[in-house]
């Protein structure tokens, strides 16, 4: 009996005798992320090494920027959860939401709202996840530079792949999505500003 129990236990433990199925995860190899993940939070030590500071210094297509404001800008997430996953970033190299000035906060929020409207237009997004991970303990990928996620959602987009296979299927290239969103941005922004200028009782539901 003891031998049978030991044999059965061996089926469900790894080399360290920890409970679980050994090597249960299927792998989607992404070697292009090595430069990003290998240095962890230490990869950003100052503005010169911060991708969110460097991006606005290059052209929009190269940096995947979809819109530039006065104090903040909007860029595609290089590792998106869903097609059209955007990041809203201040130009200033600041880590915390409380570091934003009044002017930055207003534009930060407005760009988020416009981003949602544009994504509704170009992709029929049915919902959104908005979020900021603050600090290393809060799960921020790059804690040194504040950024807010705008993730478009559709019914059924959380299928079996992320749950069973730890894999996310993303349709459409980031470059194509950037162009589509950038092309629609000004129209969406203008419509948003006009909507905001109307009296509250005249605004669309």
Image (spheres, rainbow, N blue to C red):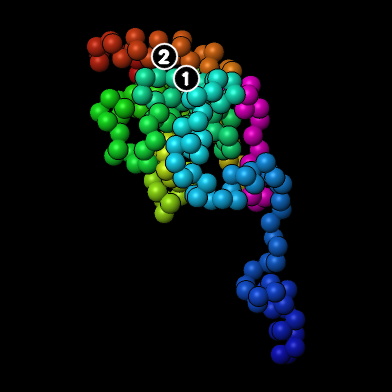
Judged left or right of residue 174, residue 71 is: left
Q: Quadrant of residue 116?
A: top left
- Pick whichever, 47 or 205, lies toward us: 47
- Pick whichever, 27 or 175, lies toward us: 175
In the rendered image, which residue does mark 1 sit on?
Answer: 67
Q: Residue sitting at 35 percent across and 12 percent down?
A: 193
Q: Is residue 28 above or below residue 10?
A: above
Residue 66, given in percent of the width and then of the height, sits at: 51, 21
Residue 140, given in percent of the width and then of the height, sits at: 45, 46
Residue 48 lies in the magenta stretch: no
Query: Is residue 30 in view?
Result: yes
Judged left or right of residue 150, residue 13 is: right
Identify the secondary structure beneath mark 1: strand
Query: Is residue 150 in view?
Result: no
Q: Residue sitting at 54 percent across and 20 percent down?
A: 60
Q: Quadrant of residue 158?
A: top right
Extent of the magenta region? 164-178
Cα distance, mark 2 to mark 1? 10 Å
Specify few, some or many for label 2: CA neighbours under 10 Å numbering under 14, 14-19, or 20 or more: some
């Amino acid at each position: 009996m003891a031998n049978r129990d030991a044999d059965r236990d061996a089926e469900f433990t790894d080399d360290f005798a920890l409970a679980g199925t050994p090597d249960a995860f299927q792998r989607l190899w992404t070697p292009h992320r090595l430069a990003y993940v290998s240095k962890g939070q230490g990869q950003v030590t100052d503005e010169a090494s911060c991708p969110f500071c460097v991006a606005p210094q290059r052209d929009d297509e190269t940096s995947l920027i979809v819109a530039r404001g006065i104090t903040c800008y909007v860029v595609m997430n290089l590792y998106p959860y869903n097609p059209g996953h955007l990041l809203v970033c201040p130009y200033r190299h600041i880590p915390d939401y409380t570091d934003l000035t009044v002017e930055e906060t207003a534009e930060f929020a407005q760009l988020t709202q416009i981003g949602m409207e544009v994504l509704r237009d170009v992709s029929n997004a049915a919902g959104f996840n908005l979020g900021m991970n603050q600090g290393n303990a809060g799960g921020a990928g790059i804690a040194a530079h504040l950024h807010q996620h705008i993730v478009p959602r559709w019914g059924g987009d959380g299928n079996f792949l992320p749950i069973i296979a730890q894999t996310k299927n993303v349709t459409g290239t980031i470059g194509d999505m950037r162009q589509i969103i950038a092309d629609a941005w000004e129209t969406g922004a203008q419509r948003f500003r006009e909507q905001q200028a109307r009296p509250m009782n005249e605004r669309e539901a």
